[in-house]
Amino acid sequence: MSAYTGRLDLEEIEITKTEKLLAVVLTAFFLIGGIWAYAKVDNVVRSELVSVDAYFTADERAAVDRASEAQRRLDGAERALAQARVDLELARERYRTALDADQPAGGLEAAYRAAESTYSSAQAAVEQARAEVATTRPASDAAYARAGHEAQDASARGELITFAVRLALLLMTLGVAYWSLIRLRRSGSRYLPVAFALVGFAALLALIMAGDYVGHHIDVEQLGPLVLSIAGIGLTLGAFWWLQRYLARRIPQRRVRKGECPFCGYPARGSGHCEGCGRSVIGQCTTCHEPRRVGTFHCGACGAA
């Protein structure tokens, strides 16, 4: 048997209910910060994208300003025409009423004629403003169309950058989580539930990202979710493979320390072969050639590793 190293295997240490509860709470807090960072990525990227107006050239900006000014004049002319129509109708009614009542209507007639003149001038102003709008609108529409396409391209680039940054954040989180799991598992640390919380947080964040992008930002047929899935599967299988190798080394040593067969765990009774699996549990030390129990850290005769 090997000498006691002073370090318990994690399998011999029971994780308490309080530690499990703390791991769950820690996962929740990881999620709060992780989701905030996940959403903040999109806000930061979008803040770098400007409005359509910023994509106008100097000539396009001038064309847009001319069209806007022409539209403002048209709006003002149409309001003035509407008011002139109301004034004309009122003046006509007053003039007609005076004529029907055989009352003096000289002043009312003059007001009516002035209202007619004002209305005619308003109609001419509207026609002129409409002609100006018709002249300036094509250049303005072309400027908006070109700038709109450029803004759409910028938005698409922004979404791609957002996805790439979020994917990098997720992969980094998965990497840190599994690295912590391997490191704490190898050292037999009581802080292993922290690594479990990290792994759980990374898995939930991956589910959130998959749900966010599948059917929303990208089509199901595209490769974004597939890349995310493959990366998560690869990291998980890699951690599982490492865990199996670790257990293959540690479990025989733990069994030997307990006086069991290193191969099957059957109680050893001092004989050269296991009564459970029949395999030899006594070998020869490669240094001093004395009998040595299979699975021990050091030889009991010479102390060689």
Image (cartoon, rainbow, N blue to C red):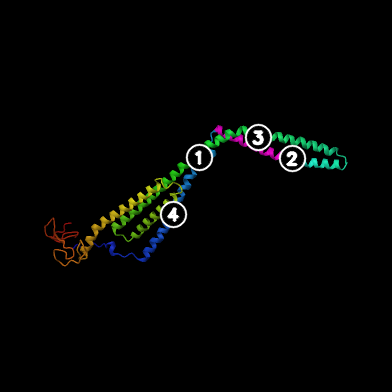
Q: Quadrant of the N terminus?
A: bottom left
**Residue 192 spot, x, y in % from top left:** 33, 59
For the residues bearing labels 3 and 2, Cβ distance under 8 angstroms: no
Q: Quadrant of the C terminus?
A: bottom left
* Circle 4: residue type: Gly
User: Any magenta on residue 32?
Assistant: no
Q: Upstream in the sequence, badge 4 or badge 1?
A: 4
Query: Which disc number belongs to residue 130?
Result: 3
**Residue 243 spot, x, y in % from top left:** 28, 56
The secondary structure that dominates the magenta segment is helix
Q: Nearer the viewer, residue 198 or 145?
A: 145
**C-alpha gap between disc 4 and disc 1:** 31 Å
Residue of label 4: 33
Residue at image location 47% in from the left, 45% down from the top:
45
**C-alpha gap between disc 3 and disc 2:** 18 Å
Callout 3: few (<14), some (14-19), or many (20+) C-alpha neighbours within 10 Å? some
Query: Which disc number belongs to residue 85?
Result: 2
Disc nearest the viewer among 2 and 4: 2
* Circle 1: residue type: Ala
For the residues bearing labels 4 and 1, Cβ distance under 8 angstroms: no
